[in-house]
Image: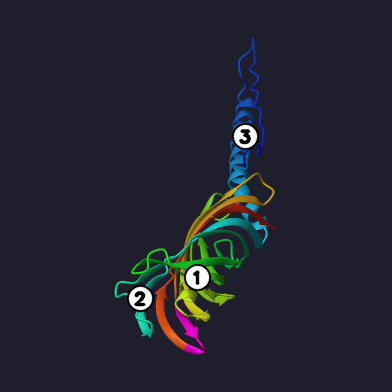
Amino acid sequence: MPGDGFACTATILGCIGRPLRRTEIPMNRLGLRAFATAAALSAAAGLAAPAGAGEAEGKVQVKVLGSAVLPDGRIEAVNTDLVGLPANTQTRANDNHVPTLAIEYFVTPAFSLETICCLTQHDVDGTTGLPGAELVSDANLIPATVMLKYHLNAGGISPYVGAGAAYFLFFGEDPGAAAVALGADDFDMSNELGIALQAGIDVPIGDNGMALSLDAKRYFIGTTARWFAGGAKVIETEHDLDPWVLSAGLALRF
């Protein structure tokens, strides 16, 4: 490790003014052999030090991140339409920026399990057919996620990849102003199970277990949206959400 290791000083004293006796030659060879052996042991100790440091690292890592949540929200299918939506109606969910907490457990130095939790809120607006119309207001989403991660360089600057499952839990969603103007008085979005892929890097800061973390996730998940008027379902559409979640922050391993 930088700054560690052994400092060795060898001093060879010559004999001045007399010939070297034969009995002194084996002793000099023995000294050289001892020096070579000590150097080899020192090198081996230096090479072994990083592995020992990696083994001493904690098994739990907590990350506090800032995340950009970038969903799609486009309509994939219209199942029910009792109000006569324009044929080319299309939608998009707005982006959001939220704090994120991740807790990671290292099963081995190279493999870990990570759970991610945050709360994000989104509106859904029309892009074509009803451009600019607010169709969904204040949809709160908890993207509960569990990832299995592989770390490519455990113990140092560590890129990683991961894959896992996610459950999108919606609550508090309301019909948007444009939907209310069309007569909608209630709205809901289905909770759905999907998958997620992940890539990122952890960069150690000093030797106290802290690191800078950069992370990108892509979710593959949709939802079914339903608008109601007087208790009757008047519109039902299926949407691709498929958000990117881009995060940066600090990690602490202990």
Describe the element under mark 2 as helix, strand or loop: strand
Q: Nearer the viewer, mark 1 or mark 2?
A: 1
Residue 125: x percent and y percent? 44, 67
Q: 10 Å neighbourhood of mark 1: few (<14), some, or many (≥20)?
A: some
Q: 10 Å neighbourhood of mark 2: few (<14), some, or many (≥20)?
A: some
Q: Nearer the viewer, mark 1 or mark 3?
A: 1
The magenta stretch is 223-232
Q: Name the mark on residue 52.
A: none
What residue is disc 2 on? Answer: 76
Is residue 124 depicted above or below 48 in this figure? below
As measured in the structure, the alpha-carbon distance from the residue carrying label 2 to the one carrying label 3 is 75 Å
Residue 42: quadrant of the picture: top right
Describe the element under mark 1 as helix, strand or loop: helix
As measured in the structure, the alpha-carbon distance from the residue carrying label 1 to the one carrying label 3 is 83 Å
Judged left or right of residue 191, residue 104 is: right
Which residue is at the front of the view, 129 or 145? 129
Q: Earlier in the sequence, mark 2 or mark 3?
A: 3
Q: Earlier in the sequence, mark 1 or mark 3?
A: 3
What residue is disc 1 on? Answer: 177
Q: Residue at x 49, y 85 (%)?
A: 229
What amino acid is at disc 3?
A: Phe
Q: Name the mark on residue 35.
A: 3
Residue 80: quadrant of the picture: bottom left
Q: Nearer the viewer, mark 2 or mark 3?
A: 2
Describe the element under mark 3 as helix, strand or loop: helix
Q: Residue at x 67, y 52 (%)?
A: 209
Label 3 near label 1: C-beta < 8 Å?
no
Main SS, magenta residues: strand
Which residue is at the front of the view, 157 or 17? 157
